[in-house]
Image (tube, rainbow, N blue to C red):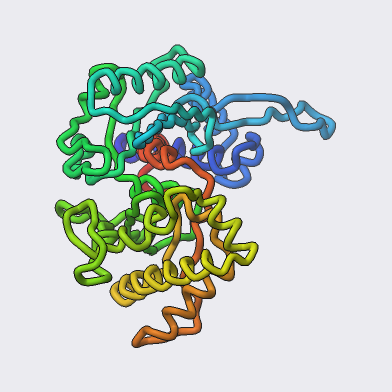
């Protein structure tokens, strides 16, 4: 019997905290009406959560004749998660609150080097950002680090990092300078995590991350599909042109060599200048764009034949894509696939301007929220 009583009390605690978290702003009466708990039970639970700094009172509702009700809020800043992305010529850091919303973002220009000096510099920037927000190290849930490379299943080692030249890099290169739990993430995995956070209705998808180098992930039941060694989304290295252009992986004709932004742009171009020329009618640029879409459609059709689910286009190219581009992709696929459909299944990411480092911070937030809201809470 005592264990049953304890279980009921724990369920009541989780339900109250879930309600406050999802409502963002509420009152004792609203909790009572929604959860059908006694006033004394609610008061006791709220007092416990206030003492733990999980719920805060701030302001009052307008009086209706009696004592004004206090507004109750989930303490969104009681914990903070940090995301970092390392790129060839820069790195970025983001801090997120418990709603996964950005508190602070910083970007630094620095050429990547696989040296202790470089990692110490990055870690000093992380510590400086954290100290600008809080001096309480217990508030920090962890640091997620995004890399363009393949990551071990436990997130502690780069198993293939040819783009940055960091194969074999271990996470202790950061933990020796940071007193927090650190974990590596593949860039497409991090981008997909942010997509899922900001798209609660998304269940299954193939995410294609297009920037200077391509990457991708497959989402099944709101989880990135995990493979044995190569994760689930190394389809940027599928061959689409036998004996085609050489790829950095050592093979030829990979998708990356035809559909990355590096493959699209000339050396003197940027995405801004390319798409400005495209939208203003430059015929040579349009011909190049049509060839690019042809190869991208070929890859998308192959992936869609394997798994019939939405295709999401993300990365630096995403914010430049228009409805007309998606229509062309659908038309190219329709004209060449064995199983044409009128259904439009390709869309652009819902967060084209979000830094990928956000996705590396989100798992620490989800883990913490599950610990206080219960593992049945769905993100």
Residue, x 27% and y 28% (percent of image)?
Answer: 113
Above or below, comparing residue 100 to residue 231 in the picture: above
Image location (x, y in percent) of residue 361: 40, 36
Above or below, comparing residue 4 to residue 269 in the picture: above
Image location (x, y in percent) of residue 94: 46, 31
Residue, x 43% and y 29% (percent of image)?
Answer: 93
Image location (x, y in percent) of residue 28: 63, 34
Can I make out residue 351 in this image?
A: no
Above or below, comparing residue 136 to residue 114 in the picture: above
Residue, x 47% and y 48% (percent of image)?
Answer: 268
For the N terminus, the image quarter is top left
Between residues 112 and 74, which one lies in front from this camera angle? 112
Corner quadrant of residue 159: top left
Between residues 127 and 324, which one lies in front from this camera angle? 324
Residue, x 63% and y 45% (percent of image)?
Answer: 33
Can I make out residue 97 in this image?
A: yes
Between residues 154 and 187, which one lies in front from this camera angle? 187
Left or right for 162, reference 67: left
Q: How many marks?
A: 0
Residue sitting farthest toward the top: 135
Image location (x, y in percent) of residue 193: 39, 48
Residue sitting farthest toward the right: 65
Corner quadrant of residue 158: top left
Between residues 296 and 378, which one lies in front from this camera angle? 296
Left or right for 67, reference 107: right
Corner quadrant of residue 32: top right
């Amino acid at each position: 019997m005592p264990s049953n009583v304890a279980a009921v009390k724990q369920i009541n605690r989780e339900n109250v905290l879930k309600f406050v978290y999802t409502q963002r702003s509420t009152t004792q009466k609203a909790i009572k009406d929604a959860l059908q708990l006694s006033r004394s039970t609610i008061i006791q639970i709220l007092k416990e959560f206030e003492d733990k700094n999980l719920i805060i009172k701030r302001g009052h509702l307008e009086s209706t004749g009696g004592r004004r009700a206090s507004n109750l809020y989930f303490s969104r800043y009681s914990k903070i998660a940090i995301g970092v992305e390392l790129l060839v010529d820069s790195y970025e850091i983001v801090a997120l609150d418990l709603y996964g919303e950005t508190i602070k973002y910083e970007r630094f220009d620095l050429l990547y080097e696989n040296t202790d000096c470089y990692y110490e510099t990055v870690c000093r920037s992380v510590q400086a950002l954290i100290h600008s927000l809080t001096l309480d190290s217990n508030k920090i849930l962890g640091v997620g680090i995004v890399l363009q490379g393949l990551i071990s299943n436990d997130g502690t080692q780069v198993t293939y990092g040819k783009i940055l030249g960091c194969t074999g890099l271990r996470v202790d290169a950061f933990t020796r300078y940071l007193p927090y739990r650190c974990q590596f993430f593949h860039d497409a995995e991090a981008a997909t995590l942010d997509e899922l956070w900001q798209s609660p209705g998304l269940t299954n998808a193939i995410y294609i991350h297009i920037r200077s180098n391509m990457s991708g992930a497959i989402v099944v039941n709101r989880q990135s599909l995990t493979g044995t060694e190569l994760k689930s989304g190394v389809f940027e290295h599928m061959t689409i042109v036998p004996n085609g252009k050489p790829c950095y992986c050592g093979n030829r004709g990979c998708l990356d060599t035809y559909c990355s932004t590096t493959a699209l742009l000339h050396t003197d171009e940027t995405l801004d200048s390319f798409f400005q020329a495209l939208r203003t009618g430059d015929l040579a640029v349009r011909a190049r764009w049509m060839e690019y879409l042809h190869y991208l459609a070929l890859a998308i059709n192959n992936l869609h034949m394997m798994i019939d689910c939405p295709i999401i286009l993300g990365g630096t190219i995403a914010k430049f894509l228009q409805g007309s581009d998606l229509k062309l992709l659908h038309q190219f696929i329709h004209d060449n696939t064995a199983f044409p459909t009128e259904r439009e299944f390709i869309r652009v990411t819902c967060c084209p301007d979000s830094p990928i480092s956000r996705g590396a911070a989100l798992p620490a937030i989800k883990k913490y929220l599950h610990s206080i809201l219960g593992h049945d809470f769905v993100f």
